[in-house]
Amino acid sequence: MGMRAGLRTSFEAMLARGVGEERLLAYVAIACIAAFVGGIPAALDIAATMPDQNAALGLISGRFVAVVIFGSLFWYGVAALSHWFAYWGFNGQGTYQTARLALFWALFLGIPLSLLSAASGQLLPLIGADALLRPLGIALFLIWLWIWTSFLAIAEGFSRGGVFLLALAISACITGIIWLLNASV
């Protein structure tokens, strides 16, 4: 209860004092850089299979551009869609900026979850616990999703019950998109 109340209080304080776009950009950029750093071991594993070292450098460089530059732009789009979804679907009272704050602050706070996921992806196979990778990844994602939707519910002026409905709706959309992407492959 204390951690959840602390997260809620930290977000409400940020909403109350207001956060400029430069700080929002810093939050999302730092989260994307952490995701890039967390993915370096997996990228190095892939690069080790490449015969040409320049190709490996290109892989790492391309991953940086994709995760940090385009990743930041992607999260701006997700924030806009989440506000649009909350506004039109649930009569949300927030703004695009408060939706960005909810998402970017959740991404920033989710850095330890992201790094734990990356570390477990490297360590669990070493001890023969590959079967734990998917459930752990899903659990970490659901924890982060709950944090984000809790922040988004606060930003949009929803009641506590609205958090569950919003989380359910967003997770259903994400699941549907993932299913569609897997079905098309």
Image: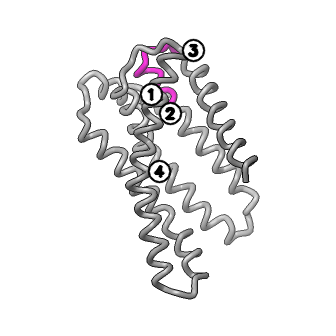
Tell me which amino acid carries mark 3. Answer: Gly
Instruction: Write down the residue under mark 4.
Output: 112
Instruction: Write down the residue under mark 2.
Output: 147
Q: Is residue 160 left or right of residue 37?
A: right
Mark toward the start of the polypeptide (4 vs 3): 4
- Which residue occupies the extreme front position in the image? 184
Q: CA distance from mark 3 to mark 1?
A: 13 Å
Name the disc covering residue 72, or none.
none
Q: CA distance from mark 4 to mark 3?
A: 27 Å
Q: Are marks 1 and 2 in contact (CB under 8 Å)?
A: yes
Mark 1 burial class by Cα count in 10 Å: few <14, some 14-19, many 20+: many
Q: CA distance from mark 3 to mark 2?
A: 14 Å
Residue at 66% x, 50% y: name it: 136
Instruction: Write down the residue under mark 1.
Output: 151
The quarter of the picture where residue 107 lies is top left
Residue at 39% x, 57% y: name it: 33
Q: Are marks 3 and 1 in contact (CB under 8 Å)?
A: no
Instruction: Write down the residue under mark 3.
Output: 161
Q: CA distance from mark 1 to mark 4?
A: 18 Å
Image quarter in which the C terminus is found: bottom right
